[in-house]
Amino acid sequence: MFTFAFAPSTAILRVHVTGSWTLPEVERYGREAGIQFAKARQQAGSLRLLVNLARTEILSQAIVAPLAKAGMQYSRPDDRVALVVHSPLMKLQMKRMIGDAPTPIFVSDEDAVLWLTDCAQCADPG
């Protein structure tokens, strides 16, 4: 399950994910992401997306690949996207799954928000 929430104070669109994803959930995300991304860009001028996976189970490659494709179809060069996970182990697994995608992965929501809002601190957390 997932929900979108835009925070005007930080201009960040958050996606909160809970439980495990199914392919129908990925398809629904693909449909809703385009609408939500456009609304966020209209309100903020650009997309700053925080995908919080801290309350989800580890995602299989069978879900990660179509999920990334669903989100990427609406991406633009000036978008900034950060992932938040619940543990260092999940961070390693997500790094392996997303490969060379330029998406930093954080264990802290606060660190992800800082990265998304402070361009002087744009370095990937590793």
Image: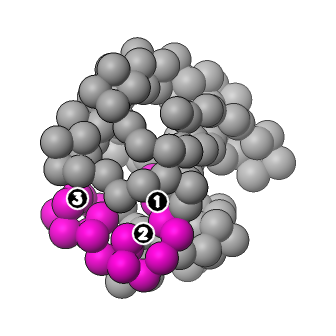
The span from disc 3 to disc 2 (Cα, nearest Å) is 10 Å
Q: What residue type is labelled 1?
A: Leu
- Residue 102 lies, with reference to residue 10, above or below; the image says below
The span from disc 3 to disc 1 (Cα, nearest Å) is 11 Å
Q: Give the range drawn in magenta.
A: 81-102
Helix, strand or loop at mark 3: helix
The answer to whether any part of residue 65 appears in the image is: no
Q: Do the residues labelled 2 and 1 touch (CB within 8 Å)?
A: yes
Mark 3 or mark 2: which comes first in sequence?
3
Mark 3 or mark 1: which comes first in sequence?
1
Q: Are marks 3 and 2 in contact (CB under 8 Å)?
A: yes
The span from disc 2 to disc 1 (Cα, nearest Å) is 5 Å
Residue 87 placed where, x, y %?
48, 76
Residue with the mark numbered 1: 83
Q: Which residue is drawn at 55% across and 60% down?
A: 54
Q: Give the quadrant of the C terminus.
A: bottom left
Residue 119 placed where, x, y %?
56, 69
Residue 31 placed where, x, y %?
40, 16
Residue with the mark numbered 3: 98
Mark 2 or mark 1: which comes first in sequence?
1
Left or right of 49? Residue 21 is left
Residue with the mark numbered 2: 105
Left or right of 102? Residue 119 is right
Q: What residue type is labelled 2?
A: Ile
Where residue 118 sits, quadrant-wise, is bottom right
| Colouring mode (rainbow / by chain / secondary structure / one colour) | one colour
The answer to whether any part of residue 33 appears in the image is: yes
Few, some or many residues within 10 Å of mark 2 (<14, 14–19, 20+): many
